[in-house]
């Protein structure tokens, strides 16, 4: 049974930092790409940052220079370091995994998802 478990979402003030974590279990994701998506209130889910099996990373424009995606394969953990947070970063953040995961990949095409962790940024 594939399982992705996110953690680290909290309420912070604008300008603050957070690190999200996603622990995977039940499957070996060798050869898979992984990523972070977010869904702001009332909006569609969107890609934020992705990393493939060769450690190539990709970022959505508003995340460039502020967010960093990384992974620790020994711990089966994916991270998202978020700095200089803005109120518009407020969203439910989801961890995703699949054969192809890019920031532009439609969420419906990604097979594995976590349950999400809420990030709220106040001004």
Image (tube, rainbow, N blue to C red):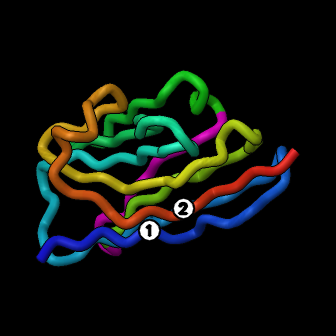
Q: Is the magenta region chiefly helix, strand or loop?
A: strand
Residue at the far right: name it.
Answer: 123
Residue at 75 percent of width and 39 percent of height: 86
Pointers 1 and 2 in contact (C-beta within 8 Å)? yes
Q: Is 26 placed above or below 117 here?
A: below
The span picked out in magenta is 66-75
Residue at 42 percent of width and 55 percent of height: 94
Q: Which residue is mark 1?
A: 6
Residue at the far top: name it.
Answer: 61
Residue at 58 percent of width and 61 percent of height: 118
Question: Is 74 inside the magenta-drawn segment?
Answer: yes
Q: Position of residue 48 (x, y in %)?
A: 47, 37
Q: Is residue 122 left or right of residue 115?
A: right
Tag count: 2
Q: Which residue is mark 2?
A: 20
Q: Residue 96 bears which disc, if any?
A: none
Asked which secondary structure carries label 1, the reply is strand
* C-alpha span from label 1 to label 2: 7 Å
Crowdedness near tag 1: few (<14), some (14–19) or many (≥20) residues, C-alpha within 10 Å: many
Asked which secondary structure carries label 2, the reply is strand
């Amino acid at each position: 049974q594939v399982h992705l478990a996110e953690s680290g979402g909290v309420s912070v003030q604008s300008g603050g930092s957070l690190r999200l974590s996603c622990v995977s279990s039940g499957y070996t994701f060798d050869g898979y790409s992984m990523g972070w998506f977010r869904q702001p209130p009332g909006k569609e889910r969107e890609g934020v940052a992705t990393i493939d099996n060769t450690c190539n990373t990709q970022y959505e424009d508003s995340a460039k220079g502020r967010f960093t995606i990384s992974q620790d394969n020994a711990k089966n953990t994916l991270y998202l370091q978020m700095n200089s947070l803005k109120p518009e970063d407020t969203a439910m953040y989801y961890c995703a995994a699949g054969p192809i995961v890019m920031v532009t990949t439609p969420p419906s095409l990604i097979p594995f998802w976590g349950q999400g962790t809420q990030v709220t940024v106040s001004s």
